Amino acid sequence: MEIANLTFMKDFYLTGLSDVPEVRAAFFVVILLIYLVTLAGNGAILLAVATDACLQTPMYFFLSNLSLLDVLCPTVTVPKMLHIFLSGDKHISFAGCVLQLFFLIEVVGTEIFLLAVMAYDRYVAICSPLHYTNIMSKQVCTQLVVCVWVLGFINSMVHTSLTFSLSFCRSNNINQYYCDLQPVRAISCSSAYVPELVLVLVAGIIGGGAFLLTLISYSYIISAVLRLRSAEARRKAFSTCGSHLTVVCLFYGTTIATYGRPVATYSHKLDRIVSMLYGVVTPMLNPLIYSLRNQEVKRALVKALHLKRFS
């Protein structure tokens, strides 16, 4: 069989987190609970924003998109992971691997761009409050969100097509619990120089640029907060900014560390931990940090659940 044909004929086998049945069962329970909390938290935000007129603002519009991404991100990988824990069957078809990788990169890339847009939105709101409604109009917000999703789609199309244009004739065992760029490219028997170069450039220039824009926005925000006269206002603002920056740094740091380096430096043990952070843990933390501590969101959610109960 020719090598070129193997690219389309071969299935893959994922590497589970453990082969010990008792450990697999424990992982199944923990990951399932995290996934359910993620769905509940982000679903609550989507419900609150969709049903409350007071939350029809740019900030909550962006937050609802972030919540949607935080539902999609673990949904791409966690169900297959749970299936492996439950059955021990690590097989994934070639088409399934392509789709999983495509949607994962789409969601991760879109979230990188969206976090930068959200930071800019907060910068305008705090540093130019008198011009905020004109700058961040409904039309502008819609255009920004559409651009973010389109950029994520294009980014994923490029990386996915480059990855699966390679030949796979060495091994079909992927050293990761889902299909991702570096572990899939690591088992290729053809040169991955061009895909690696594109990945490093995109992660370094676009991902790093988005991270830099986010940090610059928050530096201006912190500077503006320091000029507030009220100590209570400063405390609340710093508490919010600190929480947001924690999530931003965790997400950007782990994604850039994962995708911004060549395949030769790939360590499957370390990368399993890193990918668990941005793929499973961060989507669970985002609703807690960004919105569910917010009194407006809590009131809107209580109102929505109350109306649904008595409708």
Image: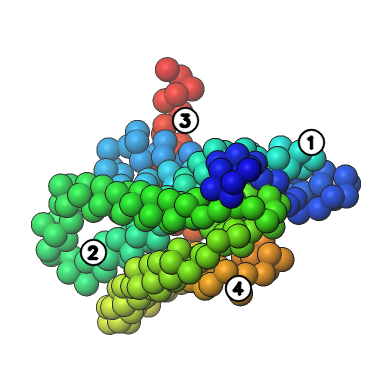
In three-dimensional space, the C-alpha distance between marks 1 and 2, rounded to whole angstroms, equals 50 Å
Of callouts 3 and 2, which one flags the residue occurring earlier in the amino acid sequence?
2
| Residue corresponding to mark 3 | 305
Q: Residues within 10 Å of mark 2 (few under 14, many from 20)?
A: some
Of callouts 4 and 1, which one flags the residue occurring earlier in the amino acid sequence?
1
| Amino acid under disc 3 | Leu
Which image quarter is the N terminus in?
A: top right
- Residue 98: give x, y in percent of width and height: 52, 44
In three-dimensional space, the C-alpha distance between marks 3 and 2, rounded to whole angstroms, equals 30 Å
| Residue corresponding to mark 1 | 87
| Residue corresponding to mark 4 | 264
Of callouts 1 and 2, which one flags the residue occurring earlier in the amino acid sequence?
1
Q: Quadrant of residue 76?
A: top right
| Residue corresponding to mark 2 | 125
Q: Residue at x 43, y 51 (%)?
A: 161
Q: Residues within 10 Å of mark 4 (few under 14, many from 20)?
A: few
Q: Residue at x 22, y 47 (%)?
A: 142
Of callouts 1 and 3, which one flags the residue occurring earlier in the amino acid sequence?
1
- Residue 224: give x, y in percent of width and height: 27, 78
Q: In the image shown, does 224 or 8 lie closer to the viewer?
A: 8
In three-dimensional space, the C-alpha distance between marks 4 and 3, rounded to whole angstroms, equals 51 Å
Disc 1, disc 3: CB below 8 Å? no
- Residue 295: give x, y in percent of width and height: 42, 51
